Amino acid sequence: MSFYTLAVYCATVFVLVAAQDLELPVQTCKRDASDYTSCLRLAMQEAWPTFIAGIPELDMAPLDPYFLEYQNTVYETGDLRADITVKNVNIYGLAKINFLAVRPHHSDDSFHLEVDLELPKMLIEGNFKAEGAYGVLTIGGEGFFNISLEDIKDTWSIEGPVASDRWTIEHFRLNPEIGKMEVWFSDMFNGNEQLNSMALKFINENWPSLYREMLPFLSQNLDNYLTETANRLMSKISFSKTFP
Ligand SMILES: *[C@@H]1O[C@H](CO)[C@@H](O)[C@H](O)[C@H]1NC(C)=O
């Protein structure tokens, strides 16, 4: 075999493998069955530990803890303008998700899945670097942060067109309601410890309104991130075999 033939052969094998319809390790549910909705809920709940552990064959990282290497965000909501970079972030708690209800909406050329869920606790911790302003206060600093969340209720809304046996997700929306939140960061005011502890006190006393103010912005960013992440998976998955 010449080198050229070998190269063509290898490329062909690669394309065949890449184009294979992979399947999710999930119990499937028949769309026309009378128990379709409850079947899907149970299938998600039962498959969840497999997703949590990560699925190397599908290039899926473990979800608990979920590791985020780097993320830069420019916030502009209300009085807050801040350029925040987080690094080496670990998110703990997703393993304990309890799926409450699933609402599938199939149409000829699209699919919309709504999922109600709750989870008792999350902890997010990592490194950050920030600069900006809150009203007239200058923000700046770097160090460690953590955020603990409790009693989280959420509805995922995942939707997009289906074509050529692929579901292309256009939106992956979250709208988390949070029962309790506690925020900590080491230095957000260029070494001014007094200002930093005042800011933490203010945030932890007023988090419900601050969170409400930031939620639309956070949701939009999460939508972009989750849509991209989910599409990396769904682009390898046969839609008709996953949702027969
Ligand atoms: C966040 O970090 C601080 C400082 O290390 C620590 O005192 C606090 O217990 C941490 N919070 C959580 C919820 O882990």
Image: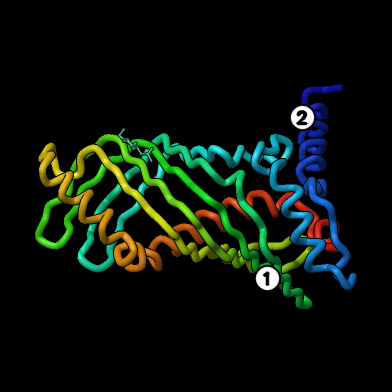
The location of residue 108, given as percent across then percent down, is 78, 77
Give above or below for 141 relative to 37.
above
* Residue at 38% across, 37% down: 126
Q: Position of residue 50 (x, y in %)?
A: 72, 41
Percent x, y for residue 5?
82, 29
- The residue that label 1 is drawn on is 112
In this picture, residue 30 sits left or right of residue 64: right
Q: Residue at x 27, y 51 (%)?
A: 83
Spot the residue most to the bottom.
107
Q: Secondary structure at mark 2?
A: helix
Callout 1 crowding tier (Cα within 10 Å): few <14, some 14–19, many ≥20: some
Residue at x-position 32% and y-position 68%: 213
Q: Check mark 1 vs ligand 1: CB closer than 8 Å? yes or no.
A: no
Classify the position of the C terminus by image quarter.
Answer: bottom right
Question: What kind of residue is marked 2?
Answer: Ala
| Mark 2 or mark 1, earlier in chain | 2
In the picture, the disc for residue 7 is 2
Residue 56 is left or right of residue 210, and the answer is: right
